[in-house]
Amino acid sequence: MRRPFTALASALLAVAMAPAALQSAAADETLTIAGRDGGYATALNRMVALYKEKNPNVEIELLELPYGGLYEKATIGFREKAGAYDVVMLDDTWAVEFMSNGWLADLDQLGGGLDADFVAPARAVSRYPVGTGTHYAVPFVGNVELFAYRSDLLDKHGFDAPESWSEVVEIARTISENEEGVAGVVYRGKKANPIVTGFLPILWAHGARVIGEDGQGGLDTDAALAALETYLSLKPYAPKGVETYNSGEVRDALMQGTAAMSIELWPSWAPSLDDPEMSKVPGKIEIMAAPGQVEGPKPMLGAWLLAVPADAPNAERGRDFIDFVTAPENQKLLALEVGTPPTRASVYEDADVVAKYRWYPAQLDALNNANPRPRITQWSQVEQILGDYLQLALIGEMEAREALAEANQQVDRALSR
């Protein structure tokens, strides 16, 4: 005969099942992150591991995607309102498209904006409209374009660190003419993104813009012409074949000691410059913000941001993870362990960090003066157009004024679509 299922037995069964029920409920809280591959994935994986230590009941899935793959998956997911991700990593050039389309959650409502320790230019591109609107993202990686020079060679020839692009040309000429086997300057001359990236700080320093204040092309101006003529005047002092150079060739020239200056250097390249196993000139390369000209230094910002999609299934947890990753102590940890450039000013001034990366004060100066690329949804098309015409001028197939005029017409067409 069956025993009656007493109230006591029922209570005991409930107690026995409670841990399993809690575990089941906790396991249902998942966090899905769409991030980059490579060094960025290393940083995010480190943060995922630490976050799970503090939140053991949260399951985390991290997608490690190449640049184009991340953009494609994110945009498809947003357009289809798939609710696929709780956190997404984005290039600051995607920000206008993602934010203006309503694809990202309002972080002011979700968690209270950003504090002032984040460097101002990176904080500005995390808002829409830029610098004044709602916070839709948090700066994660403080990439900024830097300028590098051989201090020993500049000292030898009586030069201080260049304050203007005119001085860069003069230093490049002097060293090329007097140092056998050393080019005065090196840069990426390959068309599209590489050549544009090197040219923008020169363009901005001359007071010119790719897009004018009226929202139309700003390249057909005297200021833009002066910038391009300055850029082209560097070619006689650059290595032969510089018009095909990309990052690998630029890094090699610096580390082999065969170039006195580089108009472009990124934070991820910097540690190897002081490594005697990789560099023939360790300790001799100094890093600074790009020089000015008509206007002060205008290095290019290349920040990566973290955001919560508007349709995120677990938005509050996503915001919590972003705050964890970008907290000062974790920005410091990632800088020291992985080499991820911080976005917080306090980390650049931290004694432990500066002891490891002597150039960090100069990098912070560059970040504080950094310019973002134009805040337009058509930037990828505009960059391609400008890069094509810059290279035509670099290889001598078009005069500088003609190249800028035609590029400007093409840019206006792209903007009108």
Image (cartoon, rainbow, N blue to C red):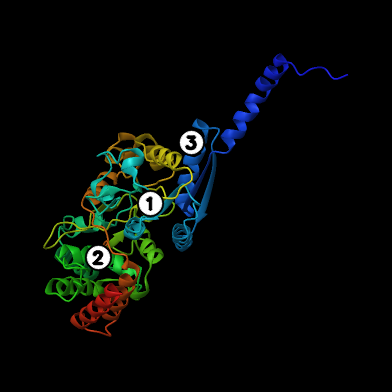
Per the rendering, the mark at residue 158 is none
246 shown above or below 127: below
Q: Secondary structure at mark 2?
A: helix
- Residue farthest to the right, as pictured: 1
Looking at the rendering, which quadrant does residue 57 occupy?
top right
Q: Amino acid at mark 2?
A: Leu
Quadrant in which the N terminus is drawn? top right
Place of residue 290 in the rendered image (x, y in percent of width and height, measured from the top left): 22, 58
> Looking at the image, is mark 3 or mark 2 nearer the viewer?
3
Looking at the rendering, which quadrant does residue 15 occupy?
top right
Q: Amino acid at mark 1?
A: Leu
Q: Secondary structure at mark 1?
A: loop
Q: Secondary structure at mark 3?
A: helix
Q: Nearer the viewer, residue 264 or 368?
A: 368
| Label 1 sits on residue | 104
Quadrant in which the C terminus is drawn? bottom left
Residue 189 seen by the camera: no
152 shown above or below 320: below
> Looking at the image, is mark 3 or mark 1 nearer the viewer?
1
Per the rendering, the mark at residue 200 is 2
